[in-house]
Image (tube, rainbow, N blue to C red):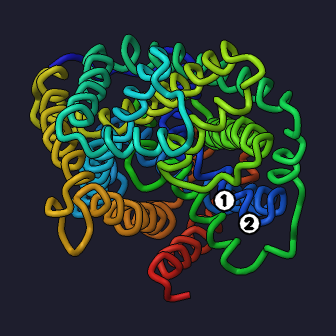
Amino acid sequence: MSERGNFGSKLGIILATAGSAVGLGNVWRFPYMAGQNGGAAFIIIYLGCILLLGIPGMVSEFIVGRHSQSNAARAYASLSKSKSWGLIGILGIITSTIILGFYAVVAGWCLFYLGASTVGQLKGDPAFVQSYFQTFSGDPIKPAVLGVAFVLITHFIIVRGVRNGIEKASKLLMPLLFILLLVIVVASCSLPGASKGIEFLLKPDFSKVGPNVFLEALGQAFFSLSLGTACLCTYASYFSRQTRLHYSATQIAVIDFFIALLAGLMIFPAAFSVGVQPDSGPSLIFITLPSVFQQAFSFSPMLGYVISIMFYALLVFAALTSTISMHEIGTAFFHEELKIRRSYAAWIITMVCCVLCIFCSLSVGNAEIGFFGMSLMNLCDFITAQLMLPAGALLTSILVGWVASKSLVREEFTNFETARGKSLFGYYIFCVRYVVPVCILLILLHQFGLI
């Protein structure tokens, strides 16, 4: 077995880990939730949730991963005196593999739409665009093939290792993603009537703020930062001992938030300029926005054509930064536990995800492929988002806050008393022991309609 890899630079650490958090959810979920829950009021609450839940949760997974310098299962076991805690890592590996399987389907849709926009097929009235998406997503062959292709693209980045694969890809993809996003934001905010979209997103409306808004903000902070997938733990196992964990977590949270905010400034001004009220889900990025771009930039069809291509390229890059991180979790586990070559370990995850991707894709157009009244794709989304992710994050907070040695946790947090910000440890341990578990329990109760 080859020597274990590590990130080669601080920039690589930040971009790779931020890339694991930045995904398709940043493009439509955050803007939609902000717009429907008080605009800037929601954003302020969301920032508070990042401080209370997001950053402490990220630091906890960083501590688990860097302390052990090993895969997720072994990392969790090494932080306690009982190997049974390693099951948290196993849960994270299973969770990330399932997510990659169905996430690849949507990533494949983005890949298809990038090609379709390039050849000019996304033209026509809204009814045509809606029919176009329904016909494509219900096709038994094309979506499955493209989803598998996306898994294979991810695979060939992963097999190149941590520095030559994950780090290099992140250093390319994240700046490209940011540049594309910034260009589209400038173009969108320059449209006639764009100010209404900006106001919709950024003007505080505290009349819409209620208990549900706080819980929605907590949930967004939880899912946006990839808590509970063992991704942060796995990436942290490649950190050097000099990496300041709380500082890195803060930088990553800021990047993730800033990109989500820019996504809102990209979508809402363009939508409002043509009188479209954007909603959430696949209908926004695959049905609503193609028509929005076509109408908003009708004064310059070529500009609209370019913006459309850039938008779907942005989605592809955002999806790829996430699939890379999800693939690495299982690859690292099989590579180290089975003591096999990294390429063989990667193929195990790739094959499992390809099979799951195919069945999830087929379930979109076939209601019979599913369980409990849900398609397989929706079922995978439900069990991971509402059960497995919260469970993983909750157990991590209990392990780090109550089970692991407090002196060990302090040593990792402060880099053996050498890092700046040592005074923050008291705040951190209080959040991990009390605030984070309570927040996660509230999210779970809210998801099941109990509060």
State left or right for residue 386 relative to residue 441. left
Quarter of the N terminus within the rendering: top left
Residue 219 position (above or below residue 122): below
Q: Secondary structure at mark 2?
A: loop
Is residue 444 visible in the rendered image? The answer is: yes
Q: Position of residue 42 (x, y in %)?
A: 77, 62
Number of disc labels: 2
Residue for badge 1: 33
Which three-letter amino acid code belongs to the residue tagged 2? Asn
Pick whichever, 352 or 414, lies toward us.
352
Q: Position of residue 178 (x, y in %)?
A: 65, 24
Residue for badge 2: 37
Where residue 324 sits, quadrant-wise, is top left
Give the residue displayed 69% in from the left and 33% down from the top.
295
Which three-letter amino acid code belongs to the residue tagged 1? Met
Residue 450 numbered mark, or none: none
Pick whichever, 411 or 70, lies toward us.
70
Give the residue displayed 35% in from the left and 65% down from the top.
382
Residue 275 position (above or below residue 405): above
Label 2 near label 1: C-beta < 8 Å? yes
Q: CA distance from mark 1 to mark 2?
A: 6 Å
The residue furthest bottom is 450
